[in-house]
Image (cartoon, rainbow, N blue to C red):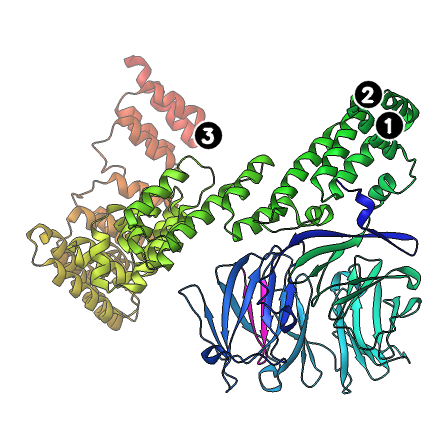
Amino acid sequence: MSNPTADWEKVGDRFYRKVQLYTAVFDQDLELDNYVVAGAPYGGALALYRDEEKLHAYRGTQAAKSTIDIYSYAGKLIHRINVCVPDSNFALLLLTDPRSLQWDKGSIKGLGWSDDEKLLVVTEDGTVCCYYDFQGDFTQFLLGHGAEEIGVKACRFWSTGFVALLSNNRLISVSRYDEPRPKLLAQPPTETVHSWTLIPPAYTLSRSVEVLLATGQTIHVVDSSDSEDRLLQNGPFTHISVSPNGRFVALYTEDKKLWVISSDFQRKLSEYDSRSRSIPKDLRWCGNNSVVLAWEDEIHMVGPNGAASKYFYDSRVHLVADIDGVRLITNEVCEFLQKVPDVTEEIFKLGSTSPASVLLDAADQLEKKSPKADDNIQLIRPNLVEAVDTCVKAAGHEFSIHWQKQLLKAASFGKSVLDLYNSDDFVEMCETLRVLNAVRFYEIGLPLSYDQFIRLTPENLVHRLVNRHEYLVALRISEYLRLPTDRIYTHWACQKVRVSTDDEETICRLIVQKLTGKRGISFEEIARAAYDEGRGRLATQLLSYEPRAGRQVPLLLSMEEAEIALDRAIESGDTDLVFFVLLHLKKTLPLASFFHVVNDRPVATALVESSAREQDRELLKDLYYQDDRRADGANVIVGESLRQRDTQSKIDKLKLAVKLLQDSKESALEVKCLEENMKLLRIQEALDKDLDESFAGLSVNETIFKLTRLGHWSKAKKVQSDFKVSERTVWWLRLRALVAKRDWVELEELAKQKKSPIGWEPFFNEIISAGNTKVASIFIPKCTHLPVADRIEMWVKCGLLVKAGEEAFRAKDFNSLEILKSKASGSAAQEIYRMIAQLRPSK
């Protein structure tokens, strides 16, 4: 193998290297000079679009046809988007996918990529298409702000957004692709814009995008609120570019000079005179410390302090900048130009005596079985840990597998000599290099550097492989790095149902066999892909393997498989999910069909019933009617009757309930009760008018009670007669009404009667509770059926101790007299003493 320094070039005090990634990249018939080339960051895909400003060879019927071709850096065609642009300036986008889209958006004015490898296509009328995969699936939005009338002139992109320059110099920014909100920036100058670029929000003090416009002799900085002239005098500037870290700006003047200044325009860092006869085609940053100028077949790399190196090619060179370098693309070759990493320079620099360089030499001597190996180890023994770490890091930055192995062997040799060394970094680097070498292989074509891989992350690398349908490589990398594999399997299955020509049974069986036992697989997502392809039966079959009912049901509803969705929701036991399906069914089905579906499922019926009882009584009545549940339907109507305010409305509702029940022999009692209720309502309505009192809502007993209390006993007797209320009930009601009214005279009249249906004790209890002992005492002698002790207690409650003593005397109850004696005083006590004295001789 050649020495790694063979492709190094010293520019100023720093070394740069040009690594050959791939050869024979593009077909010679593909004239790259006629194409606009846009590369995704982190070694992603290349998008090629024929430059509309250049003349093209006439090819018959294909004269007006062009394409957006998506390639890997190795020249492998990943996807093709056909763009037909007829003479009438009508644009028609036809995807190779059968789900083609036709559009009329004008010519393409912007082609760029996001960090997550979404292709952004911006057309002249302000339409933005965001392709989020390589199958042709995309979302679309409009810039607005008059872009459709004024027209888009050009676009500049950053990792998560872009800025569009309109023909009137107005600027529209979009900061996010997932939630696009096009925003008009401040009013820019009206002079001709010679060149322009932007500083991403992450590198500005305002944390919003800033646009640098080269107009006249100066630069204007435009943000969301202001446009500021930086008062430069050396314009016009034909090219302008900002470094990846946002700290430096490269300017190319019309007098063929390159300036590098700070992004705050306060310091001029370097100047370079290209001495070229023409303006360069492109200007890009190579990392953060050098600038690359590209003409047709010539490259100038300008480092710090104006030092430069030149490279020459046989055909047009396109530049694709990345975070740590720039890729040089021609038909014949793809190369990566970057500053030599510090650890690599430390090891391989000519004459280096660093510990890592000595360790590498020691490993080489060990392979040759030379005793110098041990001498070298002893020489760097105090710095051996540092040497091992440096070799491990340098291995990561090497593209040559040979030198990766040599550096790792050196590191392995060094750590084997050490008594104690943490090998985690070594093991991690071995895993990383194995992954990087796999994806750099020309059949994959992802030429990631180590720094790009770290920034991209393994998870996003797997996502890129999946988008390219490199499922086996993605799966092996995920297993090797212990990453989840469910998204890989799911994407494979979705693609299978999209493109497979097998019958649906075969496809379903194949997918289930492959995915059974795999964790985290979403059969719902696979089924949705099948449904989107018009394979409804296959979608239903696949959904039966989805364990989460919450994922099954929404798709089944969108597939119009309502009954299956309802069954799955019921099986899940999730009442919220069942309610969700029922609400969908109620909105989409006729009422009769809705009840037909629900009535066959008791759980669904019960939920509809409970919900309708609280929220929709009309639906509840319809449910009972459809299910021939007359009694339940009548109960609902009776409930509505109770909530009515006027009597006639209540009666009308009750008539409906009677009509509903009258054909059923089993409901004869209910019909009779409802008819009596209507009769009572009419009587109460008449009483309201006659007595100017409110009887509405009262029961029969309450009506009798109120009439008695108001002194309308005859009307109360009439109500008793009409509703056949028992005498016992009426006497109770009359007693309580008279007590509540404090009508003691009427109660004394009642006491004159010989018999009472309720007895006389209730009279005593009710009256004594009201506090009238005099009237209460009238009823004590009539309580002859009570024991003597109870009657004595009643006399005591009335405060008539002598009467109580007489009751005890007649019963010859000596003990009761003794108790009464202790409670009595004065004449009452003397009378009780007399009674006790009379009883003693007889004792």
Residue that carries the numbered disc 3 in the rendered image: 825
**Residue under circle 1?**
384
Distance, label 1 to label 3, CA atoms, is 119 Å
Is 480 magenta? The answer is: no
Labels 1 and 2: the sequence-earlier one: 1
Occupied quadrant, residue 358: top right
**Please, what is the dominant secondary structure of the magenta stretch?**
strand
Image location of residue 199, percent across then percent down: 77, 67
Q: Amino acid at mark 1?
A: Leu
Q: Amino acid at mark 3?
A: Ser
Q: Magenta stretch: give its range.
A: 119-133
Q: Classify residue 757 by image quadrant.
A: top left
Secondary structure of the residue carrying tag 3 is loop
Q: Which residue is mark 2?
A: 417
Quadrant that contains the C terminus? top left
Say whether marks 1 and 2 touch (CB < 8 Å). Answer: yes
Left or right placement of residue 839 versus residue 29 in this view: left
